Image (cartoon, helix red, strand yellow):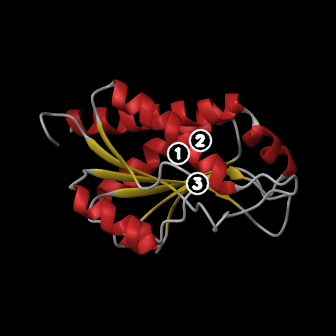
Amino acid sequence: MKNGAPHIVLDPGHGGRDPGAMGGGGLKEKDVNLAVAQELTALLLATGAVVTVTRTSDDYVAIKDRLAMANASGADFLISIHCNGFSNPAAHGTETFHYAGSRTGKLLAEKLQAAMRKALGRRDRGVKTANFAMLRLAAMPAALVELMFITNPQEELLLRTPCMTECAAKALFRGFQEFMATRTEG
């Protein structure tokens, strides 16, 4: 951290030719991820944090390039933003992933998940480990959030609303603030 300000990489998943998961109503994951990242960026910058974003528009950025950007930035933490998808449209809820063995990544994931659970009011699918490249190859503690299931008709409707985009960004912001407070106390 430079001058006490955290440096965070925000990674809005997918983009450009890669839409990510698609809702039955046509909503694309890449658009939700970017909208939430833009809101979250503004909230973090207002506190003096340094923010690096892996994409700021609807462009395709390969995972290796996202990782190269994140790792070269010298950032302290990484948050990758996604929406879940599944073949069964009844699947619903929010969950957050971290890489096994990263205690700081696990704590970050726990704080983000708790804040999303409280603010979004969706089923708590918990905090889990995963071998995702964005978690495994990041040079800093990282968490990957799955806001909701875009393939669930009810959650897709929620994700369409600017209010939910803002609510999700504020939840992630609060979770990150709580994570930082815990680190300061400990």
Q: Position of residue 140 (x, y in %)?
A: 27, 59
Q: Position of residue 172 (x, y in %)?
A: 49, 38
Query: What residue lies at 67% left-to-right and 63% top-to-bottom?
Result: 19
- Dot 1: what SS? helix
Vertical placement of residue 152 versus 2, above or below: below
- Dot 2: what SS? helix
Query: Which badge, 1 or 2, comes first in the chain's sequence?
Result: 2
Q: Amino acid at mark 2?
A: Ala
Camera-nearest label, 1 or 2: 2
- Residue at numbered disc 3: 58
* Residue 103 in view (yes/no): yes
How far separated are the C-alphas under marks 3 and 2?
Answer: 10 Å
- Residue at numbered disc 1: 113
Q: Amino acid at mark 1?
A: Gln
Q: Quadrant of the C terminus?
A: top left
Vertical placement of residue 6 versus 15, above or below: above
Q: Looking at this view, name the residue that lies furthest to the left.
A: 3
Vertical placement of residue 19 versus 95, above or below: below
Marking on residue 35: 2
- Dot 3: what SS? loop
Vertical placement of residue 27 versus 134, above or below: above
Q: Quadrant of the N terminus?
A: top left
Query: Which badge, 1 or 3, comes first in the chain's sequence?
Result: 3
Query: Which badge, 3 or 2, comes first in the chain's sequence?
Result: 2
